[in-house]
Amino acid sequence: MIPDVGAELLAEAEALLAQRSEKALRVFYQAEVAGANVDTCAAGRWMAQMLAGNFADAWCESDAIWRRGTLDPHRFWNGQPVDGKRVIVRCLHGLGDAVQFLRYLPRLEARAASVVVEVPPALLELAPFIDGVRHVVTWGDRAPLEPPAWDVQLEVMELPYLFRTTLDDLPIAENYLRVSSCKPSRGDLTSSAYPRVGLVWAAGEWNTARSIPFSLVQLLIENCGCEFWNLQGTPASDEWHCLSRSPRLQDAADCRTGVMNLAKTIAELDLVITVDTLAAHLAGAMGRPAWVLLGYAADWRWMTKREDSPWYPSLRLFRQPLPGDWESVIVRITEELRLWEEIRQEQQVA
């Protein structure tokens, strides 16, 4: 059997990409020259460029796919201009994706005749508190009686490509989600003798690799003197109740009844420690301090090797040194949290 060099190189490139190796980009080019599917190679290079923060080069790969006419049939936007058009932005990916990319609404409104945002029901209450979001609809039982009229539709994650975003041109880095005045503060968060730290350890079931074993969360709690707040959604939140009762352990149960309640609680905490899920995006959009625990092969939006996020300046990133190694991450988080506590105490004394 004659070896399929293109297929072999493509498999090598995809393995390198999964390992977040910088060599992946070069091997994707080699695979294409050797006869591998050109769009598959372009998509791989797109991911490699986004992970490296080379957004302009990634958009060139997107452009090439468009020119070849092999568009994803599930895309909403077919490249037509939005200037002077009635635009509907559909948020059909994760809730965190919507929070991150709805920051583009002021830019979009400046070009379009009108903009309607269609969000999942869970975001209907929160979305109007994002800068630039003025007309919000949803689906299901709360859908409008008359569907909004539109000329152009986009999925929210297409907005960075529409605006040809680069790291030097990111829109509204923080404080574009403003929930502090939408309702009174939680009475049980008004005062505490300890720094208040929110915890989220489990991501959605669609990607359990982002979740941390609760036993490691227990180690963090046992070795730090903060007041810890359970912000975890169900069903993982039940793990919290295996802990011994303590005045330093609080359960923000109302966070599980709506995204707005979660946002309001985060707005009043001193720090949030979370895996890659909605809580990270809410904290970042409000400019609240948060430490985000990332798997080794983290999503492209977090790029590689960085401990900060240009998307969210208030976030700090803690990455697995090896695939599956959450223990090292928790050890480092514990050390950093102790130092953070000491600095806060010194500041209070001064």
Image (cartoon, rainbow, N blue to C red):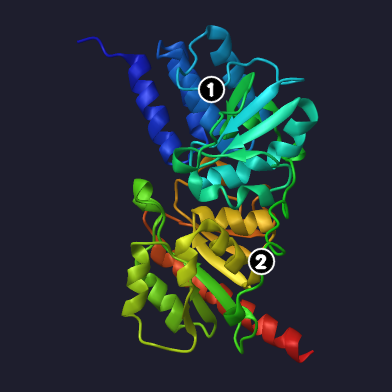
Q: Nearer the viewer, mark 2 or mark 1?
A: 2
Left or right of 4, for residue 313 = right
Q: Earlier in the sequence, mark 2 or mark 1?
A: 1
Residue under circle 1? 76
In this orientation, does residue 303 appear? no
Residue at 39% x, 87% y: name it.
245
Give the residue type at disc 1: Phe
Tell me the CA gap for discs 2 and 1. Answer: 36 Å
Residue 248 appears at what percent x and percent y? 49, 86
Residue at 64% x, 71% y: name it.
268
Residue 118 appears at what percent x and percent y? 57, 36
Left or right of 70, for residue 194 = right
Give the residue type at disc 2: Lys
Residue under circle 2? 183
Q: Nearer the viewer, residue 307 or 293?
A: 293
- Provide the secondary structure element on which disc 2 rests: loop
Q: How many marks?
A: 2
Left or right of 82, for residue 251 = left
Residue 182 appears at what percent x and percent y? 68, 62
Q: Nearer the viewer, residue 312 or 237?
A: 237
- Provide the secondary structure element on which disc 1 rests: loop
